[in-house]
Amino acid sequence: MNLPRFFVGFNLNQKEIVLKDGEIYHQVKNVFRLKQGDKIILWDGNFNETVAKILFFDKVNKNLKVKILGRKKNKNELNSEITLYLSILKKDNFELAIQKATETGIKRIVPMICERTVKKGLNQKRLEKIIKEAAEQSQRSVLPILEFPLTFEKAVFQAKQSNNLNLFFDIKGEFLSKNLELKKKKVGIFIGPEGGWAKKEIDLAKNNKFLIVRLSNLVFRAETAAIIASYIVGHFNKFK
């Protein structure tokens, strides 16, 4: 059985650590029902993780004291640095896409407001919690970055400046080429809203030399396309 994993976001070089996090305390004590002497894994979001032994539950302050038993580097991250540019979807669909894309190994998530975007508000704090829990569950070593929403035009500008390759997914695009080299590149994935891309958005992507591609002859829901595209692009070289 895998040990429960918790993101702490600070240096793990101490011999003993007091975890002053009520959520971690609750998870350890009430969800996993661990006891003194049991072990957990802590990770700092910078490729470092440790095995820690529970020494003491502070029931008054909801703190947890642990002893560090061993340290190692987590090498689970992908070679490609992938950014998912995803149009804001309906609440449950967007949260599902963000959760699963995190599990596939993406590095950054940029919510977009497109011409046909219906929902435009986001609960940033809730989404960050979903990302953290998905990263813990999938044994990531880096916590994906959730950026604040951008208009489609600003997202295109950012992607052009930041990435070596940008993939714009549309049902009328060409199939992803198996000869496409993605290893060690910064790659952007663009997924549109429930109503699809507007013509001017497709034209803007083409004018900025984005590759217009598709996953299948089948038409996927936006959240399905985001999950599949994130996985295939992230693990592309393993399929060759």
Image (tube, grey):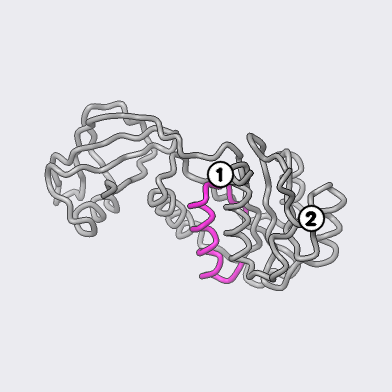
- Which residue is drawn at the image coordinates 16% and 44% (left, top)? 38
Residue 160, compared with residue 192, is above or below; it is above
Q: Residue 12, image x and y in percent?
A: 32, 31
Mostly what secondary structure, the magenta segment? helix
Examine the structure image and report whether residue 96 is included in the region drawn in magenta.
yes
**Residue receiving disc 1:** 107
In the rendered view, does 6 fall on the left or right side of 98? left
**Residue receiving disc 2:** 212
Q: Which residue is at the front of the view, 121 or 140? A: 140
In the rendered view, does 227 fall on the left or right side of 138? right
Q: Quadrant of residue 40?
A: top left
Q: Residue 95, image x and y in percent?
A: 51, 64
Q: Which residue is at the front of the view, 226 or 143? A: 226
- Quarter of the C terminus within the rendering: top right
Examine the structure image and report whether residue 52 is included in the region drawn in magenta.
no
Mark 2 or mark 1, which is nearer to you?
Answer: 2
Q: Residue 135, image x and y in percent?
A: 43, 49
Q: Secondary structure at mark 1?
A: loop
Amino acid type, label 2: Ile
- Which residue is drawn at the image coordinates 69% and 70% (left, top)? 218
Amino acid type, label 1: Lys
Q: Looking at the image, do the residues carrying marks 2 and 1 touch, with CB atoms under 8 Å apart?
A: no
What's drawn in magenta, residue-wise?
89-110
In the rendered view, does 106 fall on the left or right side of 126? right
Residue 162, compared with residue 199, is above or below; it is above
How busy is the neighbourhood of tag 2: few (under 14 within 10 Å), some, or many (20 plus)? many
The CA span between labels 2 and 1 is 22 Å
Q: Quadrant of residue 139?
A: top left
Q: Residue 181, image x and y in percent?
A: 70, 39
- Which residue is drawn at the image coordinates 32% and 46% (left, top)? 5
**How many numbered dots are placed on residues in this image?**
2
